[in-house]
Amino acid sequence: MQGGWRRARAVGLAATGVWLAVASTAVEPPELSIVVDSEWALGLRGPHSQKLEIVAQPELHWGLGTNTRLTAIGRLRADAFDRIEPGHPRATEVSSLSRRGSAGDHVDFELREFFVETQWGRTWFTLGKQQIVWGQADGLKVLDVVNPQDFREFILDDFDDSRIPLWAMNAEVPIGEATLQLLWLPDPSYHELPEPDATFAFTAPRFLPPQVPGLLASLEPTNRPRRLLADSDAGVRLAAFVGGFDVSLNYLYHIDNRPIFEGQRGTSPLGPTVTFTPRYRRTHLLGGTFSNAFGDLTVRGEVGWTSDRRLSVEDPSDADLVGRTGELAYVLGLDWFGFQDTLLSFQVFQSWLLRDETGWLRDRLDTNLTFLARRELWNERLRVEGIWIHNTNDGDGLLRPKLSFELRDGLTLWAGLDIFYGRSHGAFGEFDGRDRAVMGMEWGW
Amino acid sequence: MVKRFAIALLAATCLVGAAAGEGLPEGDEIARRINARDDGNSAQRTLEMELIDRSGHSRKRSARLLRRWFGQEKRLALFYLSPATIKDTAFLVHDFPEPGKDDAQWLYLPALRKVRRIAARDRGKNFLGTDMSYEDMKNETKVSAEDHRWTTLGEEACSETTCLVVEAVPIDEETTRAVGYGKVTYWVDPEVWIARRAEYVDAAGRPKKSALVSEIRQVDGIWTAHHIEVRSHKNGHRTVFRISEVDYATEIDPDLFTERSLRRGVR
């Protein structure tokens, strides 16, 4: 199968080369920019530094005639401490074409995005490695699952940085004032999860193989789909501006980015056993979004129905210790711009498992609330903001106050706190001991 | 005695006012002439913005600004080109012709890779850190005629010509709140029907900001301002706008004024 991927890569590179050669009859000078971020995270419960990293992100845009252009975005990251992901993470969840490279334990590099955009008639095609973002929610996701996510720092990284770009064909077809987006994603890459010795390794039961008393458990390597065509994802999105509302209908036929620990029972001289194999299973996601402004208030929302959500169950009578259910998830957000230079934003996220089953490792109805307050001062030179995410089921959450100051053109300094709270079985509470103070700078030219 | 004095003062004020506006166009007519000025069906230009604070510290941004009429509806799109940290930020407004109907506005934030619908009611707030308001950006040296009561005050020398001085007062409290000022006085050049100067005062009558418009010359037969400086009196901040690469002749693809184009940007 690796041979198949190598062939696909060769074909892709050849096609790109041909494309560039043909399209370069009216080449414009390439436009190059670079953004350098540095960040220091100091643990508050140690105290010791979680990271001291510098990230350089060069970006190239190259016009190949009036209706065609090439974009390439790279990333080079160096960390002085190597505590976020000790050693060299294997990242087996990500296909070899999309995986990061490394130079020792402290440095990794990646071709983040590489795509050609071209227009045929009114239709735009985007071909190559890219990010495709759906949905209206901030901070937590319902429909923004086309690209998988790197959880090396849980959800603390900007999604733009933690989203794993995929090789894809993306067509946007205007239909009157509406846009039909068609996607084909032949890149079998999934969420990159931290290894057990990582700073933000998951420890909450819902993310781990289930524990059943009396069963000796063992874990097999992850079984990741690898077939180019049969395991590819496809999606369609119809977006329009109707009666003052921005609306979209979304459908994604995909393999869930989260692995499920499927158990296989057995026996041994020491007693009954279960062997868990993390697998990825296909599902349908059907949903939609809306937004509109009413005076100083913007209302936005998204909803998604997942046909086949699989979750671990701690029920000794369940053969594979996996429960299957449909899931309905939605977000409703309110953004209020009533005060000068100030945004107050509130969101409610709910996920409802449509089938009840004994031994779910989460509540059937799971609710997260988020609150964002942001104020711009001194003609947007200084930004003060606070983000609060709270899970009402587990009583845990995350607080993120932050101060940013634009020192001069393209140079911004910032400082903040990432404070987790709650009990260890919660998605946020599990990181209660990882509270940190962060400071950094962003420099672009 | 006091009553007689007040009556005399009122009469004198009326006489002076009449003399000031005598023979000059009515305020509403000046507003109409400003808005009747040909600005082409579409326009594209590069905008260099220099944001300068009270201490002289300066930040620069550049953007491509596009505008096109769709019947009576005006659509405006702005795409940031630099600096690298805010490049690809984009703003889109659909200015509907129906009276009382709020504009629809979208902002594309590259860090989120999402197009956000933003509230359009508060037209007077500063546009992305500059000293121009969202209303100023949208009007492009024209005016919101129907939202104000217009009064001609007289004539004054300005920028080596003689300008008509006209005062615009928001028609009601809600409009005052929305536009963010209590009164604005324009010095309008009747040769080109562009205000060369504007002085804004807040609802309490305190100076709010000043605008100076210069380097007015024709491009494709259309009078165009190439330099605008807006100074805020509240905090001493000012923004200098330099407009270049103006093009009214080339038809702009209507698809550029859509949410999908905000994501893609212009190069």
Image (tube, coloured by chain):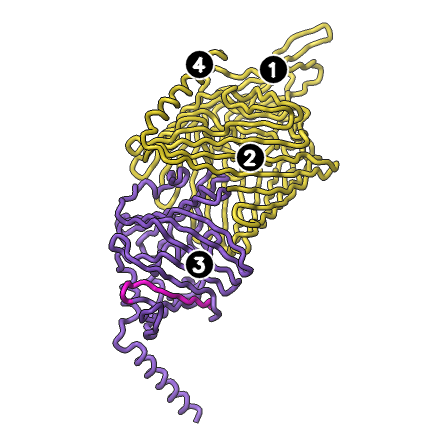
Chain colours: A yellow, B purple
- Magenta residue check for B202: yes
Q: State the residue in front, A192 or B97.
A: A192
Closer to the chain start, of discs 1 and 2, is 2
Where are the magenta residues, as a range?
B190-204
Closer to the chain start, of discs 4 and 2, is 4
- In three-dimensional space, the C-alpha distance between marks 3 and 4, rounded to whole angstroms, equals 58 Å
Give the letter of the chain under mark 1.
Answer: A
Horizontal and vertical percent position of residue A336 = 50, 50
**Tags 1 and 4 on a common chain:** yes
Residue A268 shows in this picture: yes
**Tags 4 and 2 on a common chain:** yes
- Pointer 1: what residue? A221
> In the image, which disc is placed on residue A276?
none
10 Å crowding of disc 2: few (<14), some (14-19), many (20+): some
Q: State the residue in front, A245 or A184.
A: A184
**Left or right relative to A14: residue A408:** right
- Pointer 3: what residue? B124
Question: Element under label 4?
Answer: helix
- Residue A79 appears in which quarter of the rendering? top right
> In the image, which disc is placed on residue A7?
4
Residue A309 shows in this picture: no
**Left or right relative to A246: residue B204:** right
Going by the numbered disc 3, the residue's amino acid type is Gly
Q: Are marks 1 and 4 in contact (CB under 8 Å)?
A: no
- Magenta residue check for A144: no
Q: Residue at x 60, y 40 (%)?
A: A389
Against B132, residue A56 (above or below) is: above
Going by the numbered disc 2, the residue's amino acid type is Ala
> In the image, which disc is placed on residue A56?
2
